[in-house]
Image (cartoon, rainbow, N blue to C red):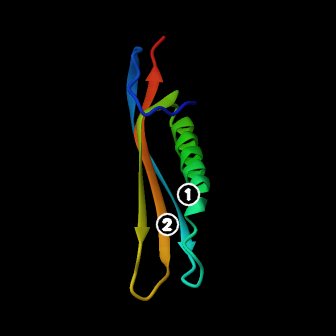
Amino acid sequence: MFLTTGTIHRRHTIQGIVNATSHLMLDSATIDAFESMDQLFSEVQEKLKERATDAGADGISDVRFNTQVVEMQVAPKFLVITGYGTMIKFED
């Protein structure tokens, strides 16, 4: 199983789109924990791989990530990372 941000130049079929999200609540009493972003990226990558494997894909191409800090008026902030890409299966 692999992830790539580029396209694949080998015969393959598209299995569909896969996405995954991880989040971390940022305690309002502490400094923003943006150093935790690496952990969230790793979690999203593992979720993407797991979902693609379950779907029978060989890999995921054109992977993109979106990072966001979500703030609500009466709740703490959340650091949210979403990843998505195209699941592919290689043709023999």
Q: What residue lies at 43% left-to-right and 89% top-to-bottom? A: 74
User: 76 above or below 87?
Assistant: below
User: 33 above or below 48?
Assistant: below
User: Is the Cβ of the residue at disc 2 closer than 8 Å to that at disc 1?
Assistant: yes
Cα distance, mark 2 to mark 1?
8 Å
Q: Is residue 36 left or right of residue 16?
A: right
Residue 43 or residue 38, whichever sits in front: 38
Task: Give the residue pinned by disc 1.
Answer: 37
Expressed as whole percent of the image width and height from the top left, the position of residue 44 reads: 54, 50
In the image, farthest residue toward the bottom: 74
Q: What residue lies at 60% left-to-right and 80% top-to-bottom? A: 30
Q: What residue lies at 37% left-to-right and 28% top-to-bottom? A: 14
Task: Give the residue pinned by disc 2.
Answer: 79
Residue 39 or residue 30, whichever sits in front: 30
Expressed as whole percent of the image width and height from the top left, the position of residue 77 reads: 48, 76
Count every numbered label the image shows and give the total: 2
> Is residue 18 visible in this depiction of the protein?
no
Residue 65 or residue 36, whichever sits in front: 36
